[in-house]
């Protein structure tokens, strides 16, 4: 599956039905890693089966962690504090920066030496932001010139630090907290604004108390972890594509069950509501193993959208949804300005420039300048043959655009959607879009 073609839905046709989106990718990475750290079996329901989470799974198995998945339940047989096995080959993070950065924190505090590498895209993504504070804790880390992968980590007995982060980065924060749990003393991370807080919410399920004071989060090292049972809610970043698709296609009505609506992740819902989207949010109960991650049932219908601005302080809460929100803006009345998007230049592709180019190729008016993206809404888009440059979120954005664009839209490298949403095309077909 290299090229997928989508046609504009004809009059009288719309998106209809209910979708169960994959488990949250960010939560799934963390559940696997914390499960590996806790001695005994951790039971995870609803784990994401995306390629990205598969990269974390692959790295952990090479470190001696047994992981078995049957139906909707995944069991991680944790090896306990400093219990990882010495890897005999390179740890392959694929295209997942989350896998690489979080496993760096895991390796740093274990008596093993491991080399983390990835695909061509990941090999261009800098890792110095994570390596520097881990080195201050006592880890020995070597990288290629420019602080690029491959990353060699030699674990050591670490000491906690108080780290003041220049950017709000959940990957950096989580890597340091993972290392901090297995260090001596207290490890604290202070951010300029709050990034997604899945790690802080999950650690108490494994017996590790977390203290928060404003934008500072701390863990006490050296405590014994215990295995956990947890349910992974649906991925809001995946759900966002259906929220926008239904908003753009007249007559549509789509329901999404059990979607995570963590306040540090739900900025996209707020932006869509500011744009006039018809999105209804009803609390959902995922059961006693849901922990403290809130979930909701979402229902969305077609609506006429208006332009909305996104401020820099909002970006950490919706960074992964920027591409699909930008598509919504391209068909909204008025001019939308997304500011503070510099982090998008360091994703699977230069996502900021790639997004602007993708929208323009479909007839939208979009311009990236510095770290900002300005979009002037147009009456309609025009189908075209486009490439997502191997970026899964750009590929899904292009496929959704094809539902509303005149004629046909062909996405050359659509298979990359498996990085985060392996069942995307099946769900698109189930709703009537293919």
Image (cartoon, rainbow, N blue to C red):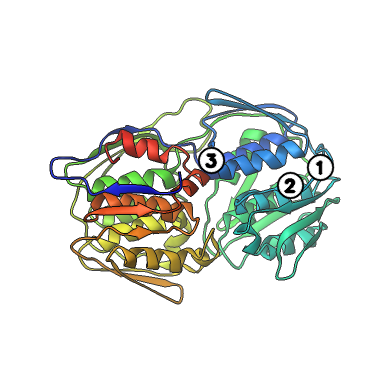
Towards the viewer: 212 or 135: 135
Q: What is the C-alpha distance between the residues marked 3 and 2?
A: 18 Å
Q: Assess disc 3: are there few (<14), some (14-19) or many (≥20) residues with their C-alpha within 10 Å of its C-alpha.
A: many
Residue at the farthest top position: 70
Q: Which residue is at 46% across, 36% downward?
A: 22
Q: Which residue is at 19% across, 50% downward?
A: 303
Q: In this view, does 35 lie to the left or right of 426?
A: right
Name the residue beneath numbered marker 3: 50
Pick the quarter of the image with the N terminus: top left
Which numbered disc flags the more N-terminal residue, 3 or 2?
A: 3
Check if mark 1's residue and mark 2's residue have beta carbons within 8 Å: yes
Residue 244 picture location, percent across and down: 30, 49
Name the residue beneath numbered marker 1: 87
Residue 59 picture location, percent across and down: 71, 42
Q: Is residue 107 left or right of residue 299?
A: right
Residue 149 picture location, percent across and down: 71, 60
């Amino acid at each position: 599956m290299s090229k997928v073609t989508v046609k504009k839905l004809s009059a009288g046709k719309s998106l209809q039905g209910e979708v169960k989106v994959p488990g949250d990718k960010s939560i799934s990475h963390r559940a696997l890693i914390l499960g590996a750290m806790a001695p005994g079996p951790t039971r995870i329901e609803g784990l994401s089966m995306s390629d990205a989470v598969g990269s974390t799974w692959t790295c952990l198995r090479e470190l001696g962690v047994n992981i078995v998945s049957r139906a909707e339940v995944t069991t991680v047989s944790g090896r306990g504090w400093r219990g990882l096995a010495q890897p005999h080959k390179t740890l392959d993070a694929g295209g997942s920066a989350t896998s690489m950065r979080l496993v760096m924190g895991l390796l740093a505090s274990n008596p093993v030496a491991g080399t983390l590498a990835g695909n061509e895209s990941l090999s261009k993504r800098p890792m110095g932001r994570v390596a520097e504070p881990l080195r201050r804790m006592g880890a020995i880390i070597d990288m290629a010139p420019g602080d690029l992968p491959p990353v060699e980590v030699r674990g050591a007995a670490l000491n906690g630090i108080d780290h003041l982060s220049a950017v709000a980065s959940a990957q950096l924060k989580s890597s340091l907290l993972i290392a901090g749990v297995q260090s001596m003393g207290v490890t604290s991370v202070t951010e300029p604004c709050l990034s997604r807080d899945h790690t802080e919410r999950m650690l108490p399920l494994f017996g590790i108390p977390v203290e928060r004071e404003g934008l500072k989060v701390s863990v006490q090292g050296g405590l014994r972890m215990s295995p956990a049972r947890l349910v992974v809610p649906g991925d809001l970043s995946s759900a966002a594509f259906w929220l926008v698709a239904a908003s753009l296609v007249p007559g549509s009505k789509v329901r999404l069950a059990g979607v995570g609506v963590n306040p540090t992740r739900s900025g996209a819902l707020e932006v869509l509501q500011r744009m006039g989207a018809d999105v209804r949010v009803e609390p959902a109960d995922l059961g006693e193993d849901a922990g403290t991650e809130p979930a909701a049932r979402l229902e969305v219908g077609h609506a006429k959208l208006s332009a909305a601005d996104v401020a820099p302080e909002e970006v950490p809460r919706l960074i992964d949804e920027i591409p699909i929100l930008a598509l919504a803006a391209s068909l909204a009345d008025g001019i939308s300005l997304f500011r503070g998007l510099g982090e998008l230049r360091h994703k699977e592709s230069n996502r900021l420039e790639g997004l602007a180019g993708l929208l323009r190729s479909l007839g939208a008016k979009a311009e990236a300048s510095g770290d900002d993206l300005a979009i002037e809404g147009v009456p309609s888009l025009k189908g075209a043959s486009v490439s997502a440059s191997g970026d899964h979120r750009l590929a899904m954005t292009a496929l959704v655009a094809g539902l509303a664009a005149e004629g046909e839209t062909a996405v050359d490298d659509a298979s990359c959607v498996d990085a985060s949403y392996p069942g995307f095309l099946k769900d698109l077909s189930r709703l009537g879009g293919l």
